[in-house]
Image: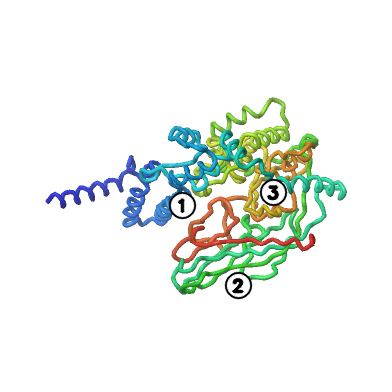
Amino acid sequence: MKTHLFVFLFILGFVSAASASGKDSVDILMNRGEFTKAGELIDHLLTTETDQAKISELTFKKDLMRRIRLDFRRTREEVITYIKKYYDTVTDAMMDEWERSGHLEMRMIDGEKKYFGNAAPNLFRVNAEAKKKKIEKEGNLPDTLDTFLEKEIPQIIQAAAKAGGRFTAPKTIELHYTLSVKADMVPEGEIIRCWMPFPRATVRQSDIQLLSASQDNYIIAPEEQLHRSIYMEKKAEAGKKTEFSFKVSYKAKSEYTNLLTAVNPQPFDAKLLAEHISERPPHIVFTDKIKALSAQLVKPGMTDIEKLTSFYTWISSNIPWASALEYSTIPNISDYCITNGKGDCGIKTLLFMTLARYNNIPAKWQSGWMLHPGSLNLHDWAEVYIGGLGWVPVDQSFGVQDLLKDDAKYFFLGSTDYYHLTVNDDYSRGFFPAKKHHRSETVDFQRGEVEWQGGNLYFDSWNYSMKVNFPNDK
């Protein structure tokens, strides 16, 4: 009798929770870190929900919790083991302080502390004392990218001067991209749909030529698509991975504009550029934190270029690079950057863009890959509109360079190199053909997107790789 009564009360309470808009709502449970309860509640709601928009929203929230679990997968013991490579002793008080400061990123999930996958390495990037400890142990090793740019930047400045304009002579670049879906991710015979990043035509990229494709039925997105992709389909075979690939060549130019010596910008038509000076929730929002930081950095009488220089310098000096959570799990990326005092290329870029837009300076997103020899990686940056010049690139992540001359120090404020592959001219836009299910990456598009009729295939279902060739350099 007691067992039946318990089951009845449990079901009654569960149904009440499912219909409540108060403390037991899905969002509140998720914010508390009670993922198991939230998932059970979602499953119950889906048994009666008929509105497709609400079904989609609930389904994504359940998937979002899975994504967060994948990001926050480290145990306390694993994190301490890593830290002890540099600290002889790690106390509870030390851990508590690092967690409180946000330097050691963790969250409670179902009553257990779980740490971000790269929480321990990030500690030695963002915490001054920990960073010093690592240098004492390993030495201050030169960064491969910094070493490359130390030689490359002066050469680009000289090449632009020789060319007599903003752009250098082009360099031919060849890419070989492969995306491989793991075996048995979908039932045999089902069609896997795949979007891969493809170069877009810009003032710095031209003569784009597809050299080969693994599938005959590919579709290259038109230039007006702000996420440029090549789309393919293939049937899944039992026990085998499903592979998509292509080769492409294009010509890339470096661009050099010394904004520090530029004359005062000419007026621009705010109506034509309205979308680029506006908020765009959830990631570009003029919060109180943004307003306060702007007030700190903007002084009376500053020109737009002086404001941009102030933002660029402050972020470069105060926001260290750190490996990032998946963007789809961050509610407001620019706010995350200010609050946590760290970020990767895209996180820093969105803070810079938000500050610029709040000050009525047009700013937009660009992204793709960085192809620098020895430093191949996904990458994000921005462009700002300067009256009389037009759109110029700003790479906030590369920041102020440790070089002697100001034109080289601030090279990436207004300039860029051959090695920035542009795929996207905005973030969180649509695909061609349209995607039917939720995206793996809700903001950016660099790795690819994959789905089948049963749903999206998240990043842990497939692998990707990029090979780069510079035939003119041989």
Q: Secondary structure at mark 1?
A: helix
Residue linked to disc 2: 215
The residue positioned 69% from the left and 25% from the top of the image is 300
Q: Earlier in the sequence, mark 1 or mark 3?
A: 1
User: Which of label 2 and label 3 is nearer to you?
Assistant: 3
Q: Specify whether 352 is left or right of 236.
A: right
Q: Which dot, 1 or 3, sits closer to the camera?
A: 3
Residue flagged by tag 1: what amino acid is it? Leu
Image x and y of residue 459, in percent? 51, 58
Q: What is the CA distance from the residue labelled 1 to the residue labelled 2?
A: 32 Å
Q: Residue furthest left?
A: 1
Please name whichever residue, 288 or 257, is drawn nearer the observer in this view of the structure: 257
Q: Residues within 10 Å of mark 1 (few under 14, many from 20)?
A: some
Name which residue lies at 73% across and 35% down.
305
N-terminal label among 2 and 3: 3
**Vertical order, 93 against 231 (above or below):** above
**Labels 1 and 2: the sequence-earlier one:** 1
Task: Please tell me which residue lies in front, 452 or 363.
Answer: 452
Look at discs 1 and 2 and give the one toward the viewer: 1
Mark 3: secondary structure: helix
Which residue occupies 67% across, 52% down? 375
Report which residue position mark 3 lands on: 144
The C terminus appears in which quarter of the rendering? bottom right
Q: Position of residue 41 (x, y in %)?
A: 33, 50
**x and y percent of residue 307 in the render?**
69, 33
Q: Identify residue for label 1.
A: 70
Look at the picture and state if 234 lies above or below 205. below
Q: Nearer the viewer, residue 456 or 68?
A: 68
**Amino acid type, callout 2:** Gln
In this orientation, which residue lies closer to the viewer: 107 or 137? Answer: 137
Q: Residues within 10 Å of mark 3 (few under 14, many from 20)?
A: few
Amino acid of disc 3: Thr
